[in-house]
Amino acid sequence: MLGQLGYWMTTTWLQWSVSLDTDGDPMALGLLYFVTLVPLLVLSPWAGAMADRRNRARIIACSQGVIAVLCAAFVLQIVLLPDLTLPGTFAFAFGIGTMLAVSAPAGQSLVATLVPRTDLTSAIGMQSMSMNVARIAGPSLTGLLLAGSRSSAPVVVYAVAAAVSAWTAWRLPAVARPPMAEAAAPAWRRVLSGVRYVRQHPPCGLALVMLAVTSIFGASYVALLPAIATERLGGGSGTFTALVGATGIGAVLGVLVTSWRDGGIATPWRIGLLMVLLGTGVTLLGALTVPWVSLVVAALTGGVNFAIMTSTNGLLNASADDQHRGRVMSLYVLAWAGLVPVGAVLLAALASATSLRTAFAAAGLLLVLLTFVLLGWHHRATGRWDVPVQAAARAFDAARYSHGHQPAVLSAHGQRTAHDSCAYLLPHLRPGQRVLDVGCGPGSITLDLAALVQPGRVTGLEPTEAPLVEARLRAVARGDSTSQFATGDVYDLPFPAATFDVVHAHQVLQHLEDPVAALREMWRVCKPGGVLAVRDVDYGTMTWSPPDAGVARWHSLYCSMARENGAEPHAGRFLDTWARHADIAHSTATTSVWTYANAASTRWYAARQASRVLDSAFAGHARARGLDLEDLRSLAASWIAWGEADGARLTMTHGELIAVKHPQPVVPLQVTSVVSRFLTSKEGADLGVSQVSRLLTHAGVGALDPMALNLTARVTRTLHEEQLREGSSAPLDRLVDTLALRDDDTKRAILDRALADVGYRLEASGVRPASS
């Protein structure tokens, strides 16, 4: 926070100094912002690649140390050369920006490695909070120091703060990370790998594009706040620092609201709404001339801007695995801060050619228009409006996958077969079926399923490419040219509804933060008449003999680490409960046991576990908890000793669930007509479109699109006007009669249950259907 305080004090001082030297020239202010932040645009991707290879705390320490030296040198220049020249100021700003570009990806990704993942949202909120507190306090302190002078005291404060920050960062403990698979690759290849990683998570890509548009056309207004203070509001340094302080106060509130509401999870429409509000705020700032009103708008605009920024920050930090986090966050820094100077220069050039009011209005209008363009593109690409932008934050990717995808893990998983891992599913398989295998890993089970449903097609899905390379090689070795392997998000499967005859997931739900949401999404892509099959271990039932303290310690460590990652190691016992919460009916729960009871099997399993202790994500998590290499070697030796013991035996109980998706009856055309008439009645108007749709689902007819219901109701409103004047319950009676091709008692029971469920009471309106 000290470094941030010094930064905001110094940048505020630089802005005001340049404003005084150029009589508030917008172009000069835009260029200052450009030279300060353009290094972020150029260097951030390379700095991100470095952050994934080097000690991130040491990168921050070295950068802060260089900043302290730059500040001291600049103060010395001011003392020796009292005539402050613009070239010297711009050179100093460029040096500060370069060091920030080097350290920003490391700083943005370090927090995720210092706290448990369960505390990540709060930690990111605290990080943003400290930055914004500094953003409020820095300009305010600078305003006090600038009163009646051009003292360089803010730069001296920054020098001291940077030195303290460097010392603090240097003392941070080194965080063990899994070895980087691309450590020997050239830097440019590692940069491209980070870009590919983001492209494999489409919600992340959309969030970054929206943030980039916000930076160019929204956030860049901050560069011209000195001109707003003097030209539009007729003030001086006090007015300028008040505007910057108000923006900071709004930013703090924006961070608080974003962290509080839904844990920072946002949808395209919510972020789009924030972008529209930001565009409106920028337009108003350029038009207003009343200082107190401008301060209020500046606070609201700052809050909206940082709400967008914090949502994107949380998404990327939570969804990126540690091997890519530095590069992913470098793209965040590039989109957030690296593109601001581009927007600042464009805004300053337009303001110089026209006026501040015209430039701010143009930027705000462009931001609003581009927001709708992006939302339209998103809807066209996905066919949905409500896909969570931060769904990837909950994806079962390597960041949350407690085992990781190291060779030791893939080798063990590659030994699994359909017969030993999903025997409960085999009786439901038929030739020609289309199968989705969620969490396919190296593909051994997937390819077994493909052989059983030929000539049907099987698709294996993983959130990351890491295990799919081996899966595709296995397919080639087996001569399988029809099976497909792709990346995707279990919370937002990239397939239309009712696509697959069988949806299968083996050992997946135990690694998810929200298994119920994942089950709902898998159920969505399952065809009517299709089968959903899931199987997960219950580590609470794992038993081994003879007793071994090292194996017991491993078991305790793994369960606690899994829970820190948002997972549930005892998932097998919860499958039927999760299915009920996901509104999945007609399910059957069973159990099966993996048993290792002979010398060959126990030695094989012990060797695999020992290898995974030393070379998997478990090793990284354990070292983050304070275990050293000797501790890990001791755990591995315990597994080997147990496997060699006479009479060694290990069992693991698994929960299994089969759910058959019974087809819903097709909605006949006459039902649509009756429903439209019902919606135009008093009863229908009171009930509402969405509740009528829900009623139809409970009645066994199947859900009708609420938008289609609304449209049909408007079209038929005039046609059925006379029937609506009957003054009776006839419209509701016709709805009841058309819905149910059943006996009267069943019909009445279904309708009563549905009406009670949506909280609608016929008695309240005095209308009673004739059938009741």
Image (cartoon, grey):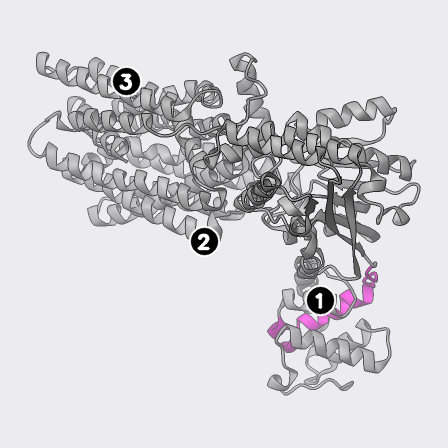
**Measured Cα–Cα span from mark 2 to mark 3:** 39 Å
Label 2 secondary element:
helix
Q: Secondary structure at mark 3?
A: helix
Spot occupied by residue 139 in the image (x, y as percentages of width and height): 20, 36
Q: Residue furthest left?
A: 148
In this view of the protein, can residue 764 be seen by the observer? yes
Q: Is 193 on the left-hand or right-hand side of 234?
A: right
The kind of residue tagged 3 is Val
Where does residue 708 sit, x and y in percent of width and height?
69, 58
Q: Are marks 2 and 1 in contact (CB under 8 Å)?
A: no
Give SS at disc 1. Answer: helix
Magenta highlight on residue 451 = no
What residue is pinned by disc 3?
66
| Residue name at image x 60 percent, y 43 percent | 552
Separation of residues labelled 2 and 1 (CA atoms): 40 Å
Q: CA distance from mark 3 to mark 1?
A: 73 Å
> Mark 3 packing: few (<14 Cα in 10 Å), some, or many (20+)?
some
- Give left or right: position of 661 versus 712: right
At x 91%, y 36%, the residue is 454
Please state the extent of the stretch shown in magenta in the rendering: 663-687
Depth check: 60 or 652 in front? 652
Above or below 440: residue 87: above
Mark 2 or 3, closer to the camera: 3
**In the drawing, what numbered circle is on residue 716?**
1
Q: Is residue 469 left or right of residue 344?
A: right
